[in-house]
Amino acid sequence: MIITQLNGTRVLIPGQAKQPENQQQALFDLLRRRHACRQFEHRPIPDSLLDRLVYAAHRAPTAGNAPYRFVVVVKDPTTLHMIRLVSPGFFGDCSAAIFVCTDLDIAAKSGRQVYDQITHYDAGAAAENVILAAYSMGLAGTFIKSYSETAVARILGLPETCRTELLVSIGYPAADELKPLKKRKGAKRTYADRYGVPWVKQGGEKEG
Amino acid sequence: MTKRGDAPAPEKARSPEEHIFELSLYLLTAARGCVGEPHIYGPLRLVDAVSRLVDIYSTTDLIRADPFLQKAKKEIDENKYQVMASEETFIAFMDKLIVEFTDELKRRSELRH
C-alpha cells in the first residue's frame, strides 16, 4: 500500500507498494542476463519490436542535445548478408542489425571534442540501450566493431559526411546458444575515493 | 525456441564459386581489420577462416565432405570465442587443433603408402 498525492489529497493505493522494488529487480535481472549473444534462431523480428529498439537508441543522450546521431536498421536479408561478409567480427545469423551512426557535419558544429570523442561515447550509450531493450523483449545480440567501415558505408549508401560508430546484431537467441563468457580477471576493478583503494562490497547484486 | 538450423536458413553462398568469392572478401576485410584490432584477433580470423572454408561442402556435391574437417569446424565454432575470455585458453585450443590435424595428416600419409 502506498500513500500518494492526487489533486492535493493523500490517497492510499493498495498493492502498489512493491512496484518500485519490482521495477528495480527487473532492471537488475536484465543487467544480469545481458551478454554477447552470437547464436540466433532464424526468424524475423516484428517491426513493432524494431520500433521499440529504435526508440531505445534515441533515448540515449547526445552532447548538448545536438542531433548528430542517427541509426540505420537493417532487416533486408540480402543487405544483412552483405554486411556480414564485410564484417569479420559479425558472428551468427541474426535477423536484424542496427548501425549507430554520426552525422559528422552536425557533430563538427559542436566542437572538436564532440566530433572526435563524445560521438563515440554517445553511440555506446545508444547501443547499450538497444541491447537492454532487446533483452527485455526476449531478443538478444551484441556490439560489433570488427567490420570494414569502407565496405559498410558503400553497402548502406552513407554519405562521406557520415560515420558508422557501432553495429548491434539483433535476433532471437538460439536454444542451444553457447554459454556466455565469464568476465576476465580484473574486469570488475572498483576503487573507493581514490585509485588503488579497493571498493568494499557491502551488499547489492550477487556477482555473476 | 527452435534450435540453430531448425528454421529456414538465412541467405548463404549458393555455389562454390560464390563461396570462394565470399571467403576472399572475408579474408580481405579481416586483413584490413588486423591493422588496428587486438593482435590476438589475427589468429582468431585465421582459425575462423578454416571454419568458413569448410562451409564449401554445403554448396556442392562435386567434392566429398570431409568428416574430419567438419568435426574440426564444429570444434572451432564452439571454442573460438574463448579468445575473448582467455588468450591462453585460445592459444591452447589452437595447439590442440594442430595436434589433431597433424595426427590426421600422419594417418592419411600412412594410408597413402
Image (cartoon, grey):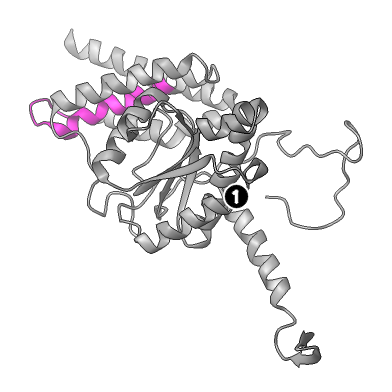
- Identify the image quadrant of residue B102: top left
Residue at screen point 39% across, 34% down = B77
Residue drawn at (83%, 57%) of the image: A203
The quarter holding residue B85 reads top right
Query: Local crowd at mark 1 within 10 Å, few (<14), some, or many (≥20)?
Result: some
Report whether residue A90 is seen.
yes
B59 part of magenta stretch:
yes
Q: Which residue is mark 1?
A: A60
Q: Which residues are magenta?
A: B45-66
Position of residue A3 measured from the top left corner of the image (x, y, whole percent): 80, 86
Residue A95 % position (x, y)? 34, 49
* Residue B96 sits inside the magenta stretch: no
Which one is in front, A108 or B25?
A108
Amino acid type at mark 1: Ala
Q: Main secondary structure of the magenta part?
A: helix
- Residue A42 relative to residue A138: left or right: left
Counting from the top left corner in percent of width and height, residue B100 is at 38, 21
Q: Is B10 on the left-hand or right-hand side of A32?
A: left
